[in-house]
Image (spheres, rainbow, N blue to C red):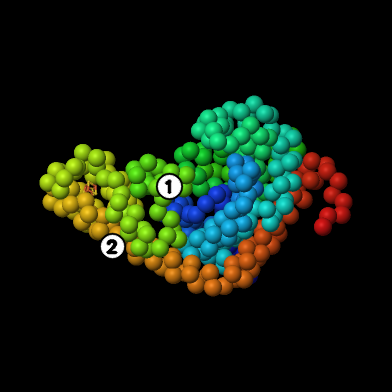
Amino acid sequence: MRSAEVAARPKVLSGFRPTGPLHIGHLVGALDNWIKMQETHECFFEIADWHALTTEYADTSHLKEYVEGMALDWLAAGLDPEKSTIFVQSHVPDHAELHLLLSMIVPVGWLERVPTYKEQQQQITQRDLTTYGFLGYPVLQAADILVYRANVVPVGEDQLAHLELCREIARRFNSLYGAVFPEPQAKTTRVPRLPGTDGRKMSKSYGNAINLADPIDETRQKVLKMVTDPARKTRKDPGNPDVCPVYDLHKAFSDRATLDRVNVECRRAGFGCIDCKTELLTHLEPVLRPIQDRRASLLQKPNLVREILAEGARRARAETRKTMELVRAAMKIDTGERP
Ligand code: SF4
């Protein structure tokens, strides 16, 4: 049972598309922040499976597995179903109804101007993204946020344009039909840059990610093989931590004393890159082990995860139902009998 105190907190909506296993970049970039927000906000965390279809519609063979994996990773990382509402987007059909209604009022030009629309069409060339669903992605995202009348949305810098569009959609709706939606505020948090093992952005598609569920031995191998400062060819060459992806991981996982020591020893060739990576592992492994232990124990109880998601969907629907009643009334849509 959720307390009235929780219900009086600012509402937060956030989520991920289930397109593959979660990696340590997701932990540092979002999950750590969500776990803190559970104490201060009324949180709704969505596994956005319909969003995954906007780019992955042609091959849905892994979708269920990724949804289940994401629920496990979230719970193992520390999202608490007693404190947060954790649900799968497609289990809450009000998202789809609000998406449809909002799509009636959103000019196509607004969507074509979203920077990621053209960028992703150019970058993801192996898929046909000239679809109605892909163009409408930001409207579905706006529906996800507005259907909870969320006040706060944690976003990275690259998502600010989407949130601004959501705010514009809320304003347009409110000006046409009356004030129903608050304009959600962005909560940007500075997070350390987390490169993958090859130095590029950590991403499943580059094959350079350290996944939360990777066995520790595999993580160790990945870290030991990581690229370093390319100018440091031998153990005797001084290195530059500022251009080294291993140091970026140190910044995310190691303590201040270790960071200072690496900074000094690297520059004067005081220790080798293997020493440096081994030191990193002594800080990374204690973060990953409890997550993996909790994941393994949850894997033994598949019904528990299903029950958590079912309860999350029930709580989410209780919230979205109230919003949709306001929306239909504002739009003068016949309320009729609804299941
Ligand atoms: S010592 Fe550490 S920080 Fe320096 S180049 Fe090697 S791995 Fe990178």
Instruction: Return the residue nearer the eye: 210 or 2.
Output: 210
Q: Is residue 183 visible?
A: no
Q: Which mark is residue 31?
A: none
Please name the residue that numbered disc 2 is placed on. 282
- Give the CA separation, mark 2 to mark 1: 23 Å
The residue tagged 1 is 207
- Where's residue 188, x and y in %? 46, 44
Residue 121 drawn above or below residue 210: above
Point out the frontmost of discs 2 and 1. Answer: 1
User: Residue 59, how many percent across, how many down?
Assistant: 62, 46
Identify the residue shown where x is 84% and y is 49%: 335
Pointer 1 local density, CA inside 10 Å: few below 14, some 14–19, many at least 20: few
The answer to whether residue 212 is above or below residue 137 is: below
Describe the element under mark 1 as helix, strand or loop: loop
User: Quadrant where the C terminus lies?
Assistant: bottom right
Q: Nearer the viewer, residue 60 or 28?
A: 60
**Left or right of 168, for residue 242:** left
Secondary structure of residue under mark 2: helix
Expressed as whole percent of the image width and height from the top left, the position of residue 161 reads: 54, 35
Query: Quick check: can you spot residue 74?
Result: yes
Please, is residue 41 above or below residue 295 in the view? Answer: above
Image point (86%, 46%), residue name: 334
The quarter of the picture where the N terminus appears is bottom right
Identify which amino acid the numbered label 2 is placed on. Thr
Q: Position of residue 217 (x, y in %)?
A: 35, 63
Say which label, 2 or 1, has the lower sequence index.
1
Query: Is 74 positioned to the left or the right of 91 in the image?
Result: left
233 left or right of 76?
left
Residue under the image location 78 percent in, 43 percent down? 330
Q: Amino acid at mark 1?
A: Gly
Front position in the image: 273 or 263: 273
